[in-house]
Amino acid sequence: MHNKTSGLDEKIVQIRKNKLNRAVDTGFLTAGDIGIICGFANAKLGDIIGSGKNIPPSYKLASPLLRAKITPSDENRYPELVAAISELSAEDPLLEMYWVQGERELVVNVTGLIQIEILESILAERFNIDAKFAEPSVIYKETPAKPGYGYEAYTMPKPCWAIIKFYIEPGERGSGFTYESKVGDNKILYRYQSQIEQAIPGSLKQGPLGWNVTDLKITLVDGQSHFLHTHPLDFMLTTPMAMMRGLVDCGTTLLEPMLDFRISADESLSSRIIGEIIDMRGTFDSPSIINGKFNIDGRYPAASSLNFPVKFASITSGRGTLAAAFSGYEPCPLELGATTPYRGINPLDRAKYILHIRGAIQ
């Protein structure tokens, strides 16, 4: 059975349905059935199984805006903590986890401070692990600053042969990424082109500034495979190297998450609240005053407003209202944002990266 989301083909060993409080092996499922599919080891919540045709459009949850380092009180329990977070990540795809090998750090992406408290409680009660989260930081993104090309020729040491040339250009804000190929089967066989397409999302997880790359258009404009020397995984290896070179050629702009807000408070507090919004680099529409209540709508960066809800409650003595929601990403000056080191072996370190992918080094 084909997993359209991951692009993997896996074998189903059993299909079961729940009947009279027990699982019965039926061997099939029909529309509307809720069942159990055994054998999909790499499937996760939200994956589309099959062709994906006639799947209706659905809402999309906002991406996590924060990330935090997590450590167990007993360092010997790191493997158990990793296993527990991995299990929770399988249940919640937005709870992304990664391990910073060189610094022995376990980092998770979360949606807010309340989720951190919930995770600490779940780890203690369900897994019997006492773990603490460090102060969370904002998750930035990056996007190409201008059009450019990414080129890589992987032809040594043989057997290997994969040549790729991408044209990369900025996209509209919030568009994610799009990909198309203008290369025919006579240059790169279509089965290898499918590998390039599968490798692109992973290639965009970290850009030159260390953040996920978004809002860009990628076009495969040239390349070459070899009927004799090309290995099935050569293009999976070459794609990240060509993509990173292209992003360096384009240069990238840092993006920060923004929140739309709506505030209502006593009229006497208007000057102080507006001052706080300005200090957070926020923008706002003309405020209104109705029956002694000061009302204002606007937008401010998530990074500068993490502690604002607590401060706002203090300013208003708990009698004001504040509502905020994620509203997208906007360019951010480097000096006001943050870059992060590349996790793992950077594709720009060509020789080391090739050895790593080929299993010669860890």
Image: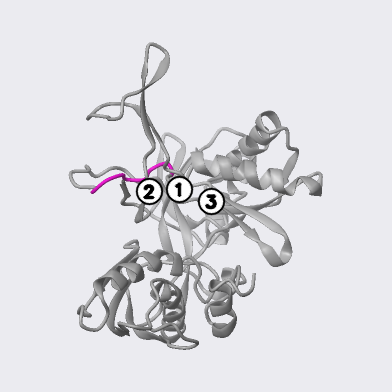
Kindly state the secondary structure of the residue where label 2 is placed. loop
52 vs 226, nearest the viewer: 226
What's the residue at 46%, 37% (across, down)?
A: 293
Quadrant where the image shows the C terminus: bottom right
Upstream in the sequence, badge 3 or badge 1? Answer: 1
Q: Residues within 10 Å of mark 2 (few under 14, many from 20)?
A: some
Q: Are marks 2 and 1 in contact (CB under 8 Å)?
A: yes
Q: Tell me the residue that label 3 is attached to.
A: 96
The majority secondary structure of the magenta stretch comes to: loop
226 vs 237, nearest the viewer: 226
Q: Tell me the residue that label 1 is attached to.
A: 42
Amino acid of disc 3: Glu
Amino acid of disc 2: Glu
Q: Is residue 266 visible?
A: no
Amino acid of disc 1: Asn
Q: Are marks 3 and 1 in contact (CB under 8 Å)?
A: no
CA separation in Å, label 2 and label 3? 23 Å
How many discs appear? 3
Q: Residues within 10 Å of mark 3 (few under 14, many from 20)?
A: some
Kindly state the secondary structure of the residue where label 3 is placed. loop
CA separation in Å, label 2 and label 1? 8 Å
Q: Where residue 161 sits in the image (x, y, percent)?
A: 39, 84
Query: Residue 252's image quarter?
Result: bottom left
CA separation in Å, label 3 and label 1? 15 Å
Q: Which residues are magenta?
A: 44-51
